Image (cartoon, rainbow, N blue to C red):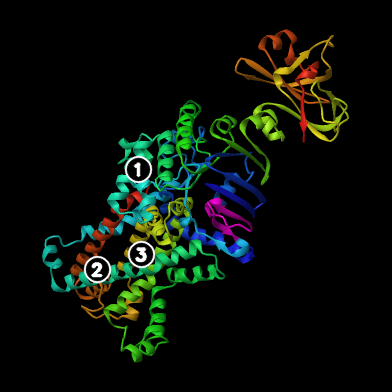
Amino acid sequence: MTDPTTRRSEPRRGEAAAGLAVVAGDSLPVGRAEPAPWAAPSEGGAPRLARRGSGGAPFGFVPLAVAAVAFLTLPLVALLARAPWRELPGDLTAPGVLTALRLSLVCSLGALALSLVFGVPLAWLLARARFRGRNLVRALVLLPMVLPPVVGGVALLLAFGRNGLAGRWLDSAFGVTLPFTTAGAMLAETFVAMPFLVITVEAGIRAMDRRYEDAAATLGAGRWTTFRRVTLPLIAPSLAAGGALCWARALGEFGATITFAGNLPGTTQTMPLAVYMALQNNADAAITLSLVMLAISLAVLVGLRGHWFPSR
Amino acid sequence: MSLEASVGLRKGTLELDVELEVAGNGVVVLLGPNAAGKTTLLRALAGLVPLERGRIVLDGVVLDDPAAGVHLPTERRPIGVVFQDYLLFPHLSVLENVAFGLRSRGAGRAAARERALAVLDRVGLADCAATKPRALSGGQAQRVALARALATDPRLLLLDEPLAAMDASARAELRRGLSRHLAAFPGTCLVITHDPIEAMTLGDQLVVLEAGRVVQSGTPEELSTHPRSRYVAQLLGLNLYRGRAEQRSVVLANGRRLIAADPVPETGDVFAVIPPRAVALHRVLPEGSPRNVWEGTVEDLDAIGNHVRAHVSGELPIIAEVTPGAVASLHLDDGGPVFVAVKAVEVEVYEA
């Protein structure tokens, strides 16, 4: 890393990854058991923190934090309060709802599968390989994370639309059209969700102790065996966290999907789109659909609490 | 069994340039201070670090020869490595760890498990087969790491500070166990350590590495009687001086003369070694026989067992081993001047 631009862009990448990936990296059961100096319980700090319930927070922090929690939870409370609990079983099994739910699961799981197949090798290369323009590649890969999803949808149309850069060729050579198809919806979700997996898994691979791979090599394991039997299990927490983030993002994807794949019930109308449509004429159905998605999100959160919220 | 290695490479500030030759079975101990390049040399032998120049030949098979473009990848070398903190795979059971090498080298699941269990039994840990590494004690982890390295019947066994992670109470016993396993190993074995007792007890041959170069090699006896570097002398607790031979005495760089009783080589560079227990300290100029007397100041006192080591500065810095009684009666802790006396018969001189 002699290139000064490379050096400068490193911390920025770290910052971007911090919120998503570093926590996952922390919970890896690997690495030398050297506690970081800041992780050691300081003898002076602990009693001072325990002195008050607020931990000695600066003036005004407590009410502001309470307001933030209220703001974040009130809509969910409203959703639960306004839910038509009595009609819920009937609404849930309505054909339109089930179709949207099934489609959402198919598309989001498909997006997750595509992200794993292409994203894990990409993450490995970003973490390990040394090549020119690696930081440029990383920036390009992460761009969909910050790009407004609608813009992503427009861009996808220009690339894979019937007259798009690649779409025209796909159409003429293979007769494949992607816009307004289920495959198109899956592609739109992958476009938006894959970066979450890549960034999290890359951080996990970087955080892992490479000497385990050296140990595997001295035991006669080739690269593929080492990856399968050592690297992959050791980065499993990052993989789980990245996969969950990626899948949740795909499940909630709205903008890119509606722009690129449209809003065709049974083909491209996923749950978020169905919620939005239902809100126009049948608010109760919208609430019901929203509840289903809330339940799924909660399930993911609970399932991964060990990775995101170390129970300390 | 033979290992011929000539390793030249640069890594960071380290410039490694080492020739190593081992014929027959035996344990070679690689001794040296931190950052001397011991681990890098071991990694080079394992193929984990590429050579820039040199050649590594094990039992007639060329593993590395950068000039000829030969580099056998690590996974195809007949080696076993015990890493410094063992690096047992945390997600695999003890048995799976030991079976890993056999599985990677193509053994079937059942055969690998059977063989792994036999090797585990040999290190006395068959009971722990199903446990995960994190539940093992340090000593058990070390034996599992050894079993894992031995399971594939390597021809070259490399151990990087195998006892460094142990506390002092467990060390002696583990060292004896390790010594037994290494003696039974039918191949060449290279052990890294910076502990002189480990080096003396485990090794048939000692190689001292400093700043990427071999400064001395030989049997433990040769090293302990004739150290050739300050590091080795310090490790063994000896006073070592380098100077020029001149008529039964050694002239040091600062002009000071050490008189020896033994025959001294006619001329040339020599080492003079003085064991600390042969150094006497006095408050008044001693009369009588000692041929080497000079003045100094006690800088520091260290208690070692039932002795005290006095670090004396002055024109010829030296370490003296005295009794606690002498410390008290001579008031050695007051920082005043002392006379250092060494009999000529205690000064051993040999060619540098």
Are dots 3 and 1 in contact, CB under 8 Å?
A: no
Of the image marks 2 and 3, the number of the one nearer the N terminus? 2
- On the image, numbered disc 3 is attached to which residue? A246
Q: Residue at x 37, y 36 (%)?
A: B122
Instruction: Tell me, yes or no, whether the highlighted magenta stretch contains residue B48.
Output: yes
Label 2 to label 3: alpha-carbon separation? 13 Å
Label 1 to label 2: alpha-carbon separation? 40 Å
Instruction: Tell me, yes or no, whether the highlighted magenta stretch contains residue B304.
Output: no
> Vertical placement of B141 versus A104: above or below?
above
Q: Chain of mark 2?
A: A
Mark 3 or 1: the one toward you: 1
The quadrant holding residue A186 is bottom left
Are dots 1 and 2 in contact, CB under 8 Å?
A: no
Q: Residue at x 46, y 40 (%)?
A: B185
Callout 1 secondary element: helix
Is disc 2 surrounded by few (<14), some (14 to 19) or many (20+) residues within 10 Å?
A: some
Mark 1 or 2: the one toward you: 1
Q: What x and y, as percent, mark residue A37?
A: 53, 41
Q: Is residue B166 left or right of residue B89?
A: right
> Vertical placement of B105 versus B352: above or below?
below
Q: Which residues are magenta?
A: B45-65
Q: Type of residue at label 2?
A: Leu
Q: Type of residue at label 3?
A: Cys
The quadrant holding residue B196 is top right
- Checking the image for residue A105, the label placed there is 2
- On the image, numbered disc 1 is attached to which residue? B94
